[in-house]
Amino acid sequence: MKKNKTTIGIDIDGVLGYFTEDLSDYVKKKFNFDVVNPHVYPLAERFGLKGGRDTSVKLLLNYIKDNQYIKMRPNKKAIKFFNSLKCNKVIITSRYPIGSDQDEEVKNIIVDETKKWLDKHGMKRDKLIFTRDKVKHVKENKVDFFFEDYFVNAEKIGKIAKSFLVTCDWNVKEAPVNSIRINKVEDAADFIKAAEEELTE
């Protein structure tokens, strides 16, 4: 990545693509479960199912093994906006570890389909990181701005960088303290422009 340039960090699911919406459609078609709690993030809770994280992981593994990541609908306006920026772009996603700690097949599917999906939809990036710890990589890559849909991550990252919480059904009831709520990624344009102008002064 180039020095003396603003660095933005970007989540994939909920920011670049409509993952949760597509996963909900998939679960409805495959298992005939309906979303009953649209304002929560954990999958099991969203569908009103018992089993907590174990159930959430099972649903996600079915989605992954049925090669659904490559089919995820892109947020075309968000991709166009990010590609228009002259910043360093670091994509940081927590996809990799979820439910796949010991499953090399699942890991390979996630990594392969994520890269193919980004290329398919023309999302430019300087780096792509799969991790459990987004905060660590925001620090290491000296990210100035980060775009996130998960409230907990947005708040943690907001303590070390300018964090934007992209409004979605599952975070609409949350009240950001360390992050800035935006309805669409383009709403952050003025913040980024101001930062770039400071670098050129």
Image (cartoon, rainbow, N blue to C red):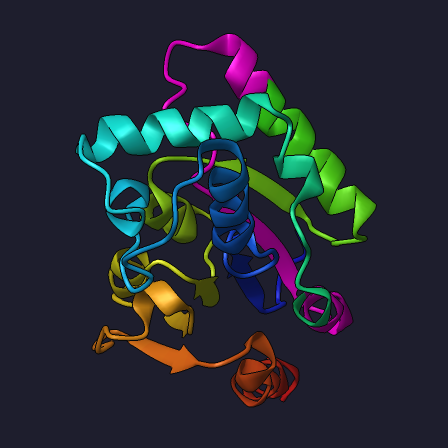
Q: Nearer the viewer, residue 7 or 185?
A: 185
Specify whether residue 153 is in view.
Answer: yes
Quarter of the figure that contains the C terminus: bottom right
Specify whether residue 161 is in view.
Answer: no
Q: Residue at x 61, y 21 (%)?
A: 109
Q: Nearer the viewer, residue 91 or 111?
A: 111
| Residue 122 drawn above or below residue 84 | above
Q: Identify the image quadrant of residue 117.
A: top right
Q: Residue at x 47, y 48 (%)?
A: 24
Instruction: Provide residue 195's location: percent of width, then percent of height.
Output: 54, 82
Instruction: Provide residue 185's location: percent of width, then percent of height.
Output: 56, 75
Residue 111 is left or right of residue 115, and the answer is left
Q: Residue at x 23, y 39 (%)?
A: 49
Q: Extreme front residue here?
A: 32
| Residue 77 drawn above or below residue 129 | below
Segment tinted magenta in the rendering: 79-108
| Residue 53 drawn above or below residue 177 | above
Residue 78 is left or right of residue 144, and the answer is right
Instruction: Provide residue 171's location: percent of width, then percent of height.
Output: 32, 67
